[in-house]
Every structure is written in structure tokens, then in C-alpha cells.
Image (cartoon, rainbow, N blue to C red):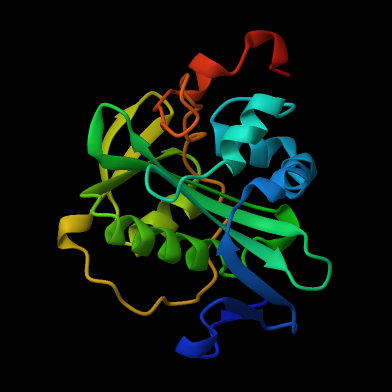
Amino acid sequence: MTARATLPSAAAADTLALADGTRLSLRQVGAGDRAGFAALFAGLTPESRYQRFLSPKSELTPRELTFFTDVDRVNHEAIAAVDQRDDSIVGVARYVRDASRADVAELAIEVADAFQRMGIGTALTTLTIQHAHANSLKSLTATTLWENRAARGLLRHQGFRARRSRGREIEHELKLEEFTPREAAWVPESPVLIARAASLPSASPTQATHIRPKAWIPRSRLT
């Protein structure tokens, strides 16, 4: 039976309770999460990694781990779902501001395979959208594979609209100028492995740079 996620109350908005009793803390990612983020990636199936990065990927480099956990809260925000039983990270959603368009950012989400279809992706996406809106971004984009219907459904549920497609990929956009913050509907979505790897850093670690995954994943590291 699929476990549904419920948010007990506004006062407990940092805790997500699953139907099986598991409680997850929803919090911002920090530099101390390198090991937890690496473990999350290591536990993903090859299919889940492919859906997340839109290409095969066997490992994260130290530089990538630094980028994914060194978050400045303005150009780059990341929210983690943490299992309160063992402090393991079971999901992360993030946005990274587009270096060429200061009011646009790209959304990316990943959830551990064992925790998919529990509403975690919906919860993380909702919080990330709220942070983006609070930071005065005007739109969010996200890219999925055409065949990833569940991820497309999650985005549609959040108000994203398909904008264009290239080959097997489809780009979605949410106009934050038209967005009204609301209570999240904590319902099962997933698999919630959507979008591209949000870009790697430029020479300055506080500047988010928008680079397509295939441009920054070395071919020698592809499986």
C-alpha cells in the first residue's frame, strides 16, 4: 500500500509525516550535507539517475558535491527531506538562478527510490517554489524526459506549463508573477526525479552558472 504524506499543521511545517509513521524533517541543505547527499546519489538506481540528470551518470565528483551543498540561499537554494530515524537525506529539491537571466531559475528534484510515491517530491517542490517566489524570481523552469509521465504530472500539479521540447526532453515553466502562495496538497506524485542537474559553479563559488548536464559531465565518467 502506498504511504501518503500529511502535513500536521502550519506550526509543524518543517515536519512531513508519512502514513507508515515515518517522519521527515524538511530543511535547507548546508555544507555539512556532503556525505548525506553523496549517499542519496549512491543509492539511486541507474534509471533514477538517468531521469534526474537526463544522461547516464555513475558518480558525483568532489567539485559537484561542493556545488550541490554550498548554497547561498539567493542564487541557489536547496531543500532536503531528512529521515528523522537515522538523519539520512531521502530527497532534495533545488533551484539555481540562470546566470544570463537574473529573474529565472531552474528547478531540479531527486527522491530516493524507496521513498518515491509518498508525496515527498510534492512537498519539496512546494517549499522550493515558495523560496523562489520570496527571492523575487519571476519564473522557474524544469526539464523532464517525455516518457517520465509522473514527473510531468508533478510539475503540472504545481502549475508548470510545457514550453518547448527538444528530442526526448520537454521544458516546463512556472510564471511566479502569477503564483499565489498556498497550502501544499501533500499527495503522492513521483517518481520525482525531474529536471537537469542544476549548473556547476563558475570561478566564484557564490555565483550560480546555468550549464547543461552534458556540457559538464565528462564523457570519461559516463556509464
Give the tally of numbered discs: 0
Q: Is residue 211 left or right of residue 61?
A: left
Query: Furthest-top residue in view?
Result: 220
Identify whether 51 is placed above or below 123: above
In the image, is 62 to the left or to the right of 178?
A: right
Quarter the N terminus occupies? bottom right
Which quadrant holds residue 35? top right
Point out residue 76 in the picture as x, y percentages from the top left corner. Answer: 44, 44
Query: Looking at the picture, how far across and down is residue 36, in whole percent?
Result: 75, 50
Q: Quadrant of the C terminus?
A: top right
Q: Residue at x 66, y 79 (%)?
A: 18
Figure check: 58 above or below 77: above
Q: Position of residue 198 (x, y in %)?
A: 48, 35
Q: Nearer the viewer, residue 77 or 6?
A: 77
Horizontal relation, residue 31 to residue 184: left or right: right
The x and y percentages for residue 212 are 44, 23
Question: Do we see residue 57 in this rendering?
Answer: no
User: Measuring 74% from the left and 28% from the top, which residue is drawn there?
Assistant: 59
Residue located at (60% from left, 77% from top)? 16
Q: Quadrant of residue 84?
A: bottom right
Q: Does residue 70 show up?
A: yes
Residue at image position (72%, 35%) is 46
Can you name the residue that lies furthest to the right here?
86
Q: Is residue 183 above or below residue 148?
A: below
